[in-house]
Amino acid sequence: MIEEVADISQVHQWKFHVFEEAFPNQTFTLDSCNDSVYGICFSPPNCEVVCLTFTCSGKMCTFYNFESSKASSNELTENYLSVKTQFAGPEIHKQLINIFDYLNKRYFENFDLTDEGNYWETKNDQLLEDTFEKYTNLINGFDSLLDNIPIGAHETVEEYLIRIAEITHKNNKGNRNDNKDLQ
């Protein structure tokens, strides 16, 4: 798996890092877990790092949350990876989903993927584009709110966000009433 992911990363000119490549005795073990992380991480453009890293027991873990004491006692609660692709765009998102699909068929057991873009489940390009557009509009709208409604001098962040929510709610309610008049 590591060699194939490294090849994919090289083809796309993505930076990558290989950790340990072979499990002790070429098998997973719970008896004598060590301090090593096994696998590879790679970085598509404008995307969070994708970590395909594992403990010696074969449990998926991110290298930055790895605690060898918990790995050796099989207490790791994390058994997932999370990758934010919003700023990478739908094409990178699709590439990653296709990589995961390939790796799942070839290497993984009990692999579940939750895809907020719904591409994993549907392979529907238009749905993915629409989802990315929706989230981009939400982010841009919130950014615009922050630009146009400054935080008060003595206002806490919580008070500020509540005030923005109230203004947004009031404006949306007014827009709904305006739309009723147009119908």
Image (cartoon, grey):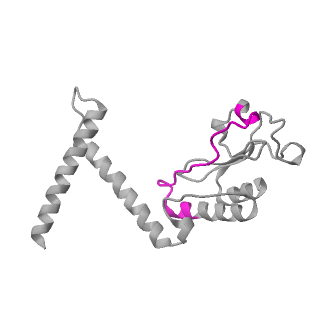
Q: Position of residue 87 (x, y in %)?
A: 47, 53
In the image, is 76 to the left or to the right of 134?
right
Q: Residue 89 lies in magenta, yes or no?
A: yes
Q: Position of residue 130 (x, y in %)?
A: 41, 67
Picture residue at 74% right of the left edge, 34% below the top? 73
Picture residue at 70% right of the left edge, 46% below the top? 53
Q: Position of residue 47 (x, y in %)?
A: 54, 51
Q: Is residue 123 above or below residue 46?
A: below
Q: Position of residue 84 (x, y in %)?
A: 52, 51
Q: Residue 72 lies in magenta, yes or no?
A: yes
Picture residue at 65% right of the left edge, 64% below the top? 101
Q: Quarter of the image holding residue 136? A: bottom left
Q: Would you say the magenta stretch is mainly helix, strand or loop?
A: loop
Q: Is residue 84 above or below residue 121?
A: above
Viewer-nearest residue: 160 or 173: 173
Viewer-nearest residue: 164 or 129: 164
Q: Is residue 94 above or below residue 37?
A: below
Q: Quarter of the image holding residue 56? A: top right
- Magenta stretch bounds: 70-94
Picture residue at 80% right of the left edge, 36% below the top? 33
Quarter that holds the C terminus: bottom left
Quarter that holds the N terminus: bottom right
